Amino acid sequence: PNPATCDRRYSSPFSSSSFKIFFSRKSSGGAASSSGGKMSDSSDPISGWMRKFVADQKPELKPWLRCDGTGKYSYIEVSVKGARHNNEDAAYADGKLFCVFDGHGGKHASSLLKTKLAEMFYETVKDSDEAAIVRGTPPTVVSAIDTAFTRSQQAMPSEMPLAHSGSTAVCCWVQGQSPSNVTVYASCLGDSKALLFDSETGAIPSVQIRTWDAEMNSLAGEGERSLARAETNCHNLTGGLVLGRDGVPTAMDKDPTGVGFREYKLLKERHKFSASRRPYNISNMPGEERWRVLDVEPTRALGHKLKREQPLQHPEIHEWPVSNPEKELLMLSCDGFFSKEAFQTPDRVTKFLSDPEGYCSDPALFEGTCLLALLQRLKEAHTLPDPRNVSMAQLFDKIHDVVFGKLSDDTWTSAYDSAYQYLKTFAREKPVPNIRTAPAKTLLAACYLAVLMVSDDNVSVSVIFLDGQKRFNGTRMEMGEVP
């Protein structure tokens, strides 16, 4: 595709005449705040001011919250509509299988996956008992996940306009042989994210993993073994091609793991496009790069049935042993946390969850964000506060003061102010909550902080407690608008 013909939503993010920010969005078509210790099993995790906040929001701005202790593994699910006209995300959870879907080009693909992927998975493993599902070469659960993705793609519509929609996905199966013996089978297709993290420190552990990937012809077998961080890869191109002396591409810019170049080679092999067809950056947003070689991104997704050059459609699947189920949590999220570099890395999200107050006093808080890059372009970077010299509530006030007057989109300003109002109240709680003491409240705060830091996407996330304890009095509580 010619970059000049790309959808205008990828044009310059601000007006040179008014310097009003126009954060483009996808088309619809410090001291620690609390010590460690045992995580809260609050029977009413969305009580008090949080419940009133949700009730007071306009329907289109109501966040979605579910706290579910009815299954084997308790979880919290949160979704926030950011600077979009519609929330095209979806999620599935039953206490053992957990999924988050990030729809694009319409909601049909993500809505179909919300029911179809789990249906196809359980149809594949229906004759396997709890122990048998992790036996075999590859384990039954691994082949079942890959099959579920394949059959879900087959079920996608092939007529317009429904065939225009697509979705990325993360899907995790939690296998618990005993409270101290837990393994996660995590699959990813696209740029959504699954990871394990320490609830006290926010650290993402490095573990001995096994990986299977049908796109890499490694689905059959025992899996590729490695010592790696317990997080899924984002299936994106990361930059331009690095050429060898003979002019043949040998690597990709800004690709320390090699995943970006690997994905480029897989697409080139699949679609047989010429060597002259190179990745290009579709974003003019300061501090942001979004690279494409096809007319869709990321490199893997389901749906898009009528596209001549479709994304890759098999997930990358990992096996992660959980070393400390009492402390470690599983998180699945769409890429809304990372849009416009609101959180520069997954570690930044998990560090906020474990210690919001400490995170918000980090002098490097704004480094690498599009917010800082844009203000530098406008020669206004000095207007951002020094996180070391203000309280968390003051920090949120000052970020809001800097950004709000520059927003030029009514949908964005409404979402932005809603996020700010929540964070202002959250920051004034003493002690400040964290993912252990008030998990639902803190998870929603992370979503809203992404919005405050000018993520222009919806933010959907699920956190799963891996200790097997029944939380929320063994009940399910829901509030807000289902995305």
Image (tube, rainbow, N blue to C red):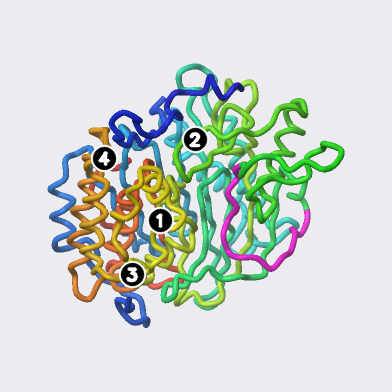
- Give whichever of 25, 36 is nearer the camera: 25
Q: Mark 1 or mark 3: which comes first in sequence?
A: 3
Picture quadrant where residue 352 is located: bottom left
Q: What element carries label 4?
A: loop
**What x and y, as percent, mark residue 461?**
40, 53
Mark whose residue sits in front, 4 or 3: 4
Distance between the alpha carbons at the discs numbered 4 and 3:
25 Å
* 355 over 274 or under it: above or below: below
Q: Which disc number belongs to residue 462?
A: 1
Q: Mark 2 points at which residue?
A: 283
Amino acid bearing label 4:
Lys
Distance between the alpha carbons at the discs numbered 1 and 3:
26 Å
Q: Name the residue under label 4.
A: 406
Mark whose residue sits in front, 2 or 1: 2
Asked whether, in this view, residue 373 is left or right of residue 265, the answer is left
Asked whether, in this view, residue 341 is left or right of residue 158, the answer is left
**What x and y, as percent, mark residue 16?**
35, 30
* 110 over 211 or under it: above or below: above
Distance between the alpha carbons at the discs numbered 3 and 2:
30 Å
Asked whether, in this view, residue 333 is left or right of residue 121, the answer is left
Distance between the alpha carbons at the discs numbered 2 and 1:
29 Å
> Do the CB atoms of the residues marked 2 and 4 lie less than 8 Å apart?
no
Q: Residues within 10 Å of mark 1 (few under 14, many from 20)?
A: many
Q: Residues within 10 Å of mark 4 (few under 14, many from 20)?
A: some
Q: What range of the chain is rendered magenta?
A: 221-236
Mark whose residue sits in front, 1 or 3: 3
